[in-house]
Amino acid sequence: MIWHCDRRRLMTGAVGWGASVAVPRIVRAQSQTLVAATFPGTWSEADRNIIAPAFKQAAGAAVTQSIVLGTDQVARLTAAKGNKPPFDVAFFDTPQVLDAAKEGLIVEYPSAQSPNFKDLIPKFQDKWGPKITMQVIGIGYNPKKITTPPKSWDALWDPQYKGRVGLTALNSQLGIAFLAEINRIKGGTETDFEPAFKALRELLPNVGAIAANLGAYATLWQQEQIDIAPYNFNFVQTLKAKDVPVELAIPATGAVGWETSLHLVANAAEPELAVKYIDLHLDAVIQAQMLKPPYDAIPTNSKVKLEGAVTTAIAKSQADLANVRGFDWTKLNPQRGALIERFNREIKV
Amino acid sequence: MNVAESRLALPLAALFVAFFVAPLVVLIVLSLHGEVAMRTWTLANYVKFFTDSFNYSILWSTLLLGVKATLLCVGFGYPIAWLCARSSARMQSVMVFLVILPILTSVVVRTFSWIVILGRQGIINQVLLWLGVAHEPIRLLYTEVGVVMVLAQVQMPLMVLPILTVMSKIDPNLGDASRVLGAGEWRTLWRITIPLSLPGVIAGCILTYTACITAFVTQTLIGGARLIYMPLHIYQQAIGANNWPFAAAISIVFMVAVLVIVGVLGAIGRASETYARP
């Protein structure tokens, strides 16, 4: 009977079956419907308002956009491994790309079938999938309370902001990037996070709130629960568009960030549509549309001229974009679990 | 129950096996492995949990959080149920509607509205500042006091409804007899109503307690990341750290701890039922 089956196969089958039940089957049953993941916030709005109509026109097919965080996408794809995946297009930040590629959750991007791929700035032409934008972090602040823009990360430690500093837990990309940047500034390395945690302990008296997720983090700004905190350029733009008093300052130590990319999922139900959908994100006209507020998505296509908020906050030209410092995720990724645990220990009240 | 009748329970049993027992078995097996691919059997995840005081400090604070919120629920819920049971049928339906109103909206919506109430610029702080009670906004959001308050409000129906059900079944003659024999309202409440409604209170406690300690949304949105409770701990291990086996192990530990508490409450409940029977 069932227990005579290979244990591992039974387990993956059970997990995969559970995951496939969780996915709306009806959506899947209709032919020619692509299921694509997208990030909450700026990207889900841009995907819905710009990409979905354009895709319908270009490919004659509908797309269901599923709003899921990168780490959750990896979890869902892992659960469905060996079965039909819950979506065809994955939407990742740099660290998840490494995890997903290692686990065989995504396949190499068929760039030959993607006419816009070659127009990307070379550093954004990744073999696992094109980078569609960059996320840059800096110091978010409430301009009603803080009239001079902070010039350095040190501002967070300023005693005058006692109880007014916000942070986010390390399961968000923002949290981990902030910790890694502080570590670098304080003299740590990718393998030695001691300086970052020492700085974190010194920062805690100033910290008024640590949000468990990015949704709660946005609420902290909206409710003016915090005045100064590390934040992401695109989230600031989204909140500003909703009249929340928040601005972003890039510290003197320079802009830091990571890339966001799209991927063809292994065993995708609609691989051709998936590539068409991804390619649309690379199109110069589309990227120019996404560069406009409230999306302000940093373009990766070399033919798109930088303009708007990006040029005042981050980069005047495409060349400046190349100077945005990144992180070595191949070294950071394996430590993520340990870092989250250590961070929780340090902050738990 | 005869065999033919018991067949009626088969669809439910099948559903239960497919959607509860099977995933639970997967969870247990996963927790006994070293990696997601399940290549090596190990007890390391459990050893890791029990040899680290950080983990059981989280477990303990979670179980304690449930106690605090449940006590608050009993404190407010019992009088409401008592009033409800004694009102006219018309008034009763209005009150029951008011009691279940919170569960008619999404927990996320309810919790977000609590953020607006508890925040620095929130209603409570505005009132305190206006009254001059406080000179600067007091911290309610991201504190355990805030979490307990919100949990008690959000889960209140789970407490009131079972108590109300049991109370409305109490024979009104018992109260009358007590009064005729010279007992006052308080004595009647203490000697007649409370003992007889105890099974309802216990049922309400089990429901609210389990709902409070597993309320991931409320705990994380109102409590933030510094107040780590088991659901957030499990989520971070599973999704943030991608450590499924350890997340599975702490889920099992959490589940067993909760089952023990529910078992004890259930035993008290059964004892109180025999007490209530003539």
Image (cartoon, coloured by chain):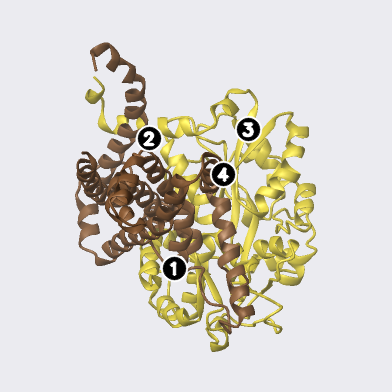
Chain colours: A yellow, B brown
| In the foreground, A155 or B17 | B17
Is the residue A322 above or below the residue B193 in the image?
A: below
Circles 3, 1 touching at the beta carbon (< 8 Å):
no
Residue A264: x and y in percent read 57, 39
Residue A174: x and y in percent read 54, 64
**Among the 4 quarters of the image, the one containing residue A348:** bottom left
Query: Rounded to the nearest whole Å, what is the CA distance between mark 2 and mark 1?
Result: 38 Å
Which label number is shown at residue A15?
2
- The residue carrying mark 1 is B145
Subunit of mark 4? B
Which label number is shown at residue B94?
4
User: Does the image show residue A116?
Assistant: no
Mark 2 or 1, closer to the camera: 1
Query: Rounded to the nearest whole Å, what is the CA distance between mark 3 and mark 1?
Result: 46 Å
Would residue B221 be found to the left or right of residue B166 on screen?
Answer: right
Mark 1 or 4, closer to the camera: 4
Q: Secondary structure at mark 1?
A: helix
Residue B156: x and y in percent read 45, 52
Which label number is shown at residue A284?
none
Mark 4 or 3, closer to the camera: 4
Query: Rounded to the nearest whole Å, what is the CA distance between mark 1 and mark 4?
Result: 30 Å
Which of the marked residues, 1 or 4, is nearer the chain's N terminus? 4
Amino acid of disc 3: Leu
Q: Residue at x 30, y 38 (%)?
A: B24
Do tags 1 and 4 sit on the same chain?
yes
Q: Residue furthest bottom?
A: A159
Amino acid of disc 2: Val
Q: Residue at x 35, y 31 (%)?
A: A14
